[in-house]
Amino acid sequence: MKFIIEDGVLVKYYGNESVITLPYSVKVIGRRAFACAEGKEVILNEGCERIEKYAFSRMRGLKKVCFAKVKHIENHAFMMCDLEEVVIGEGTEIIEAEAFSYNKNLKKVLLPKSLKHIDSTAFLGCALENLEISPENPCFETENNVLFTKGKEKIIVYGMGKGETVYNIPAEVKEIAPYGFSECKNLEKVIFPEGFVKVGEFAFRNCDNLNNIVIPPSVKYLGDCAFRFCKSLTNIDFEGETFDYFGAWLFDNCHALERVKLPKTEILDGTFCNCYKLKEVTFPETLKEITWTAFLNCKDFTVSGLPQGCVIKERPK
C-alpha cells in the first residue's frame, strides 16, 4: 500500500513513483507525510483542504505541484524541495510561515484571488523572479516582483531574484513586514520615502551587499535584528532624533560598520554585537543605560564618551 490514510488524513506515503496522484478520499495531508520521499510531481485531489506543517519538507527532486482547492498551507509544508514554479489554485486562503522556503530554484509564483493571509517568510530563501497575484485579490497586490498589501501601505515580500542593486520604496509604503527583504544578496541600497514608519524584525537580515542606509525622520520603529548580518553595511544615517522602538541585536554581525551617530534612544541587547570594525559611536545625551551585550566582540571599540549618569549593566554572574 502506497498511502496510509486515517479518517481522511494522509498519514504516510511509501511509494517511489515519479508522478504521485493523491486519492480522492484525502482531505488533509498530514505532518511529514511525504517528508524526504521521492517523486518529481504531486497532483493534489479536488477534495484536499489542508496541507499540514512539514508535509513535503526536504522532498528532494520535487519540481512541480498541481494545486487544487487547498484552503490552508501550513508552515514549512514544502520547505527545501526542488520546486521551480508554483501556481496556487483558487480556494487557497492561508499560506503560513516558510511554507515554500529555501526552494533554491523557485523562480515563478502565481497567487490566487482567494488568498487572505500570507506570511512574509512564505518564500524565504527563494530567488523569485516572477511573483504575481490575481489583480482581483482584495487583500494584496504585486508590482515589479514585490508583494504588497492592497494600496501598497506595507511590503510583504520583495522577490530575491529581482537582481537590482538599488530599490526605491514606493511613496505609499509605510511599513516593511518581518523578513521582507531578508537574504536579498544583490541589494546595495534602499531608499525610504517620506512618511515611512516601520521596519519589521529581520527585515534586511543577510542582505550581504547592502552598504548604505538613510533612515528618514518619520521612522519610529526598527524591529529586532532588522539589519543583522548585513556584512557590507558601512554607513547608516539617522535623520530623526527619537524612536518608539530601537531593536535588540539591530546591527549584530555588521562586520564593516565603523561609525554611528545614535539618535535619542535606548540601546538594547546585542545592538552592535560582532561589529568587528566599529571604532566610533556618538551617544545621545539622554542615554541612561547600556546592556553588557550591546558591544560584545567589538574588537576595535572601547565604550567612552558616555553622557553623565549613564551606566553599563554588568554581565550576570
Image (tube, rainbow, N blue to C red):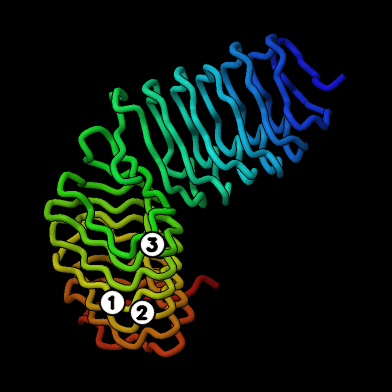
Q: Is residue 209 above or below residue 23?
A: below
Pointer 2 or 1: first along the chain: 1
Q: Residue at x 36, y 22 (%)?
A: 113
**Callout 3 secondary element:** loop
Task: Determine whether, in the image, residue 244 is placed left or right of residue 65.
Answer: left
Q: Which mark is residue 248?
A: 3
**Residue 43: percent from left, percent from top:** 65, 23
**Residue 256: percent from left, percent from top:** 40, 80
Q: Residue at x 60, y 11 (%)?
A: 47
Q: Which mark is residue 235?
A: 1
Q: Could you say which is closer to the camera, residue 265 or residue 159?
A: 159
Residue 142 seen in render = yes
**Residue 230: percent from left, percent from top:** 41, 69
As measured in the structure, the alpha-carbon distance from the residue carrying label 2 to the one carrying label 1 is: 6 Å
Q: Nearer the viewer, mark 2 or mark 3?
A: 2
Identify the amino acid type marked 1. Answer: Asn
Q: Which mark is residue 257?
A: 2
As measured in the structure, the alpha-carbon distance from the residue carrying label 1 to the one carrying label 3 is: 19 Å
Task: Determine whether, in the image, residue 289 is placed left or right of residue 241.
Answer: right
How many residues crowd around disc 2 within 10 Å: few (fewer than 14), some, or many (20 or more)?
many
How many residues crowd around disc 1 within 10 Å: few (fewer than 14), some, or many (20 or more)?
some
**Callout 1 secondary element:** strand
Task: Determine whether, in the image, residue 230 is placed left or right of residue 73.
Answer: left
Q: Is residue 11 above or below residue 39?
A: above
